[in-house]
Image: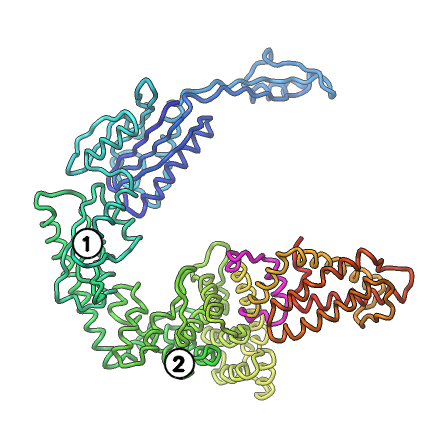
Amino acid sequence: MPDLLIELFSEEIPARMQARAGEDLKKRITDGLVEAGLTYASAAALTTPRRLTLAVEGLLAKSPTIREERKGPKVGAPDKAIEGFLRGAGLTRDQLEERETPKGAIYFATIEKAGRPAAEIIAEVLETTTRNFPWPKSMRWGSGSLRWVRPLHSILCILTDETGAQVVPMDVDGISSGDTTAGHRFMAPSRFSVTSFDDYAAKLKRAFVVLSPEERAQHIWNDAQNMAFAAGLELVEDKGLLAEVAGLVEWPVVLMGQIDDEFLDLPPEVLQTSMKEHQKFFSVRNPKTGRIERFVTVANRETADNGATILAGNQKVLSARLADAKFFWENDLRIAKSDIAQWTRALENVTFHNKLGTQADRIGRIAALARELAPVTGADADQAKKAACLAKADLSSEMVYEFPELQGLMGRYYIEAAGEDAAVAAVAQEHYSPLGPSDDVPTAPLSVTVALADKLDTLAGFWAIDEKPTGSKDPFALRRAALGVIRLVLDNDLRLHLDRFFDGQLLRAESAANEALAAENVDELLDEIADHGVFGAAFQTVKERLGEVSGADFLSLEKKIPDASDDLLSFFHDRLKVFLRDEGIRHDVIDACIAMDGNDDLNLLVKRARALNAVIATEDGENLVQGFKRANNILTQAEEKDGVEYSYGADVKFAETDSEKALFAALNAAQAKIEPALKSEDFPTAMAAMAGLRGPVDAFFEDVQVNTDNDIVRRNRLNLLSQIRQICSSVADLTRIEG
């Protein structure tokens, strides 16, 4: 079985595109080969800045011969039908076979497709792949029609077996395939021929090209760590930058340079970000002081002066960049110390969304909500409002304008410089968290408060203007914001009714989107919601107090806000299902708990779901669910048939069997445990008491016929089933449990 080697050699491919391009090459070539009948043992894609390489082992030498039998029309069918069948099969009439079937004589055709040499198939698949390669961006050059990420110079395509290597002949826009490649652009630019993948990889390394991106990354990391260690420093880990730099060089040469003393007092994050974004430098930190004191750069060639000239040039460019950063830092500090509020005022001229007002408007809504959330999170209300007002001030700073990824972090520095409390300053950095499933969750009360307010305002605002996620589209990252709220609530063990805060924030967002709403009416509604937590009741109170309220827009909120609030809560429940999936909690278990009162208290909901999930995972719990469903089905059918509700309590004096009497006793005992457990939110105890009913319920159904001929006994047993339903349903809606 031959091995296949393909290399597409071009000008430099952007580092961010290389990994995906390697996977695309592998998938498209191997899929095409298999579709044509060529199977293989293994395939691997490798990339460097100038080449995409694919090595396929154990390929078939030719595709197998395929015999296909087709059933045609009946013998004696119209000539046009027979001719159409012959055209489709590519045969003549004398090649058809007549066979007797239960439906009469039928024409059959046997079509044989001869196998094709591997080289012929490979040439077709590679040409198609090259012409239709899915680059994010591509270009044309010269007079050809081929589009590639950068000009394509050569195509290496060879099949190797025990007899040697042969070139697979093909041509794409005048670029003919061959068995040669080139080494490093500067250190070994000459072309050379190869006979196999092993020969190819070995000769490339001698020509100063490391083919494997993982090997290049490991070499860079090891050398950089060793240099830092030798200087008594430590390398700042950055996996993303490491992968990017490994895609910029074919022969990595690691160099360590010095940062000028005048820049060492800049915040380490500023130094690190500036060097990473502009120069692709790694930061080297002094572990004793935490300062960034040196940098590591990776050259693409060896030089006679061991990189001295390269380092000198890099240090000169870096000094110019850091001079800009130092200017931004010092200017921002001066403003922060004199009047940091001017940055917040500047946000009055920055639009957050054309329907939701400016960034300053949004900060006002967040501050108001943070004050309302403070009693729940244990934060000081005045401090929460102040922290919320300052948290986004750094968006107006020059440093964040230059490096947007430093927002929040720079705010912490500037707020501390303004003389504010460290806890207030920390909010600027922490209120954006968590940004993803692996991001740390804030725990400081002030940070938790403003983080919740920020995310809830974002969600309520876009729900108010009907800009919700659809399918895979989520341009405002609302799913991420909802997940952030869920993690903040659960990780900090918070108890808050989201529905109330949704109503208030939806109303604030609506007032921003609709100038017709009178501010005093909105404020009065918010006060009522704060007191009572129910939008409908609050609206009626304000309506009665104001009498004839002018403006249909205000009146329309009576339905719009609750509907949007319910829809937003449903969105949270969907996100919660995704979040709890990793814990192994089933969707139907969460649905069973969502059906209970208090489902806008995420902490309560999750505690109930975890306890229920643990119970139904046991044999007793699973069987009890089946017993409950059986009881509920019998009871529901009887109530529909009789036109009455059996919920008035069963009497043990009508019990006829021991199992029936035992069930009475078990239900009373379970209820005595479940009711106080639910009041104290001890769901494991309540669920365990419910699961303990499994034995008595099973024995009852095995021993007793519910729909007996004795009407008194029948009604008593149906009321007993109602008691089962009532007790189990007080814990969760078991009708929603699947299976």
Q: Where is residue 327 in the image (x, y as percent from the top left)?
A: 17, 69
Q: What segment is highlighted magenta in the picture?
A: 578-603
Confirm whether the magenta stretch covers residue 48.
no
Tell me: 160 left or right of 82. Answer: left
Q: Mark 2 points at which residue?
A: 385
Confirm whether the magenta stretch covers residue 602.
yes
Label annotation for residue 270: none
Q: Name the residue under label 1.
A: 296
Q: Position of residue 631 (x, y in %)?
A: 76, 60
Where is 737 relative to 299, above or below? below
Q: Which of marks 2 and 1 is nearer the N terminus?
A: 1
Mark 2: secondary structure: helix
Tell me: 80 left or right of 636. Answer: left
The label nearer to you, 2 versus 1, is 1
Q: Which residue is drawn at 47% across and 61% down?
A: 479
695 and 241: which is toward the camera: 695
Where is 101 relative to 715, above or below? above
Mark 2 Cα-neighbour bin, 10 Å: few <14, some 14–19, many ≥20 = many
- Report which quarter residue 134 is drawn in: top left
Q: Position of residue 171 (x, y in %)?
A: 31, 27
Residue 465 visible to an observer of this rendering: no
- Report which quarter residue 570 is drawn in: bottom right
Residue 279 visible to an observer of this rendering: yes
Where is 201 relative to 164, above or below? below
175 and 213: which is toward the camera: 213
| Extreme residue in the left direction | 305
Mark 1 Cα-neighbour bin, 10 Å: few <14, some 14–19, many ≥20 = many
Tell me: 72 left or right of 283. Answer: right
The type of colouring in the image is rainbow
